[in-house]
Image: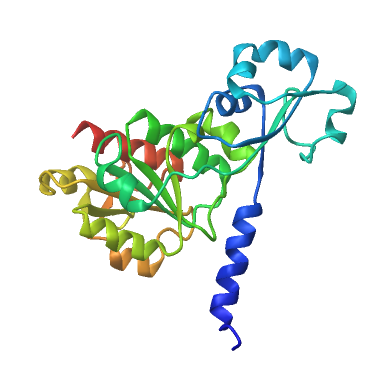
Amino acid sequence: MKKPAWVIEKERARRAAAAETVWLFGLHAVRDALMNPRREKLRLVLTKNAADRLGEALAAGAILPEIVDPRKFDAHVPLGPESVHQGAALEVKPLAWGSLDAVCAGGEGRALVVLLDRVTDPHNVGAILRSAEVFGARAVIAPARHSAPETGALAKTASGALERQPYLRVGNLSEAMERLRDMGYVLLGLDGAGKLTLAEAMAERGDRPVALVLGAEGPGLREKTRETCDRLVRIPCAGGFGSLNVSNAAAVALYAAAAD
């Protein structure tokens, strides 16, 4: 019996995910990954100078480094010419944080999560992961497609937060939002046209956990995402017109939610 097309596609996606690896680069990102026991490490390429600077992280990482000539470093690892690697690169498997339920229903940190609707810039997502860690959010959640994947550029911008802050990739963002609502979360979508300010929405939400939903710069929240939110809220600006970069908006919203 021939398998349905959707079954074949699902199996292909599962095999691709199992084979996926990520190259992390830069001393900070590589050091944090080496120190993370949850991270599966495959290959470590260093210059002698970088190995000396990593010190105790090498012992903690339990992986034998390949020491290469700094002049030939780029020939040993598949990094782009714009990658500021500082003589350190580590091939790893993406982190497996567990299910949405396990992380968001009773995970560590405040009952506070961030959902990103098609935010594809790794620098923005890396910065949001840093803010989420600072303010104690349980997770940053994004769709598996049309969002920034776990990459070296994201890890470098996250400045270590990628190793500590759960970053969950889900098949369907709206379904994940509905599941969070079932857990008791109130879904607050950030939108410049929102009738309520973020502070007003936080005041009326009682003691319910909070899910902050942010869209990509330019298009903002998709229609289905907007419809799934409980409230559309805005961050008030001093002038008649103003807007924040999505990572800055996330930091402001996280601060407001954490301080409430």
Horizontal side of residue 69 vs 48, given as left or right? right
Q: Residue at x 42, y 40 (%)?
A: 166
In the rendered image, which quarter contains the C terminus?
top left
Numbered marks: total: 0
Horizontal side of residue 40 vs 179, given as left or right? right
Q: Residue at x 33, y 42 (%)?
A: 239
* Residue 110 visible to the viewer: yes
Location of residue 180 in the rendering, given as x and y in whole percent from the top left corner:
27, 56
Q: Is residue 189 above or below residue 103?
A: below
From the viewer's side, name the closer residue of 98 and 216. 98
* Residue 194 visible to the viewer: no
Location of residue 102 in the rendering, given as x and y in whole percent from the top left corner:
32, 48
From the viewer's side, name the closer residue of 73 and 7. 7
Residue furthest to the front = 1
In the rendered image, which quarter contains the N terminus?
bottom right
Horizontal side of residue 96 vs 213, given as left or right? right
Location of residue 92 in the rendering, given as x and y in whole percent from the top left corner:
64, 38
Q: Residue at x 68, y 12 (%)?
A: 53
Q: Is residue 121 above or below residue 259?
A: below
Location of residue 204 in the rendering, given as x and y in whole percent from the top left corner:
11, 48
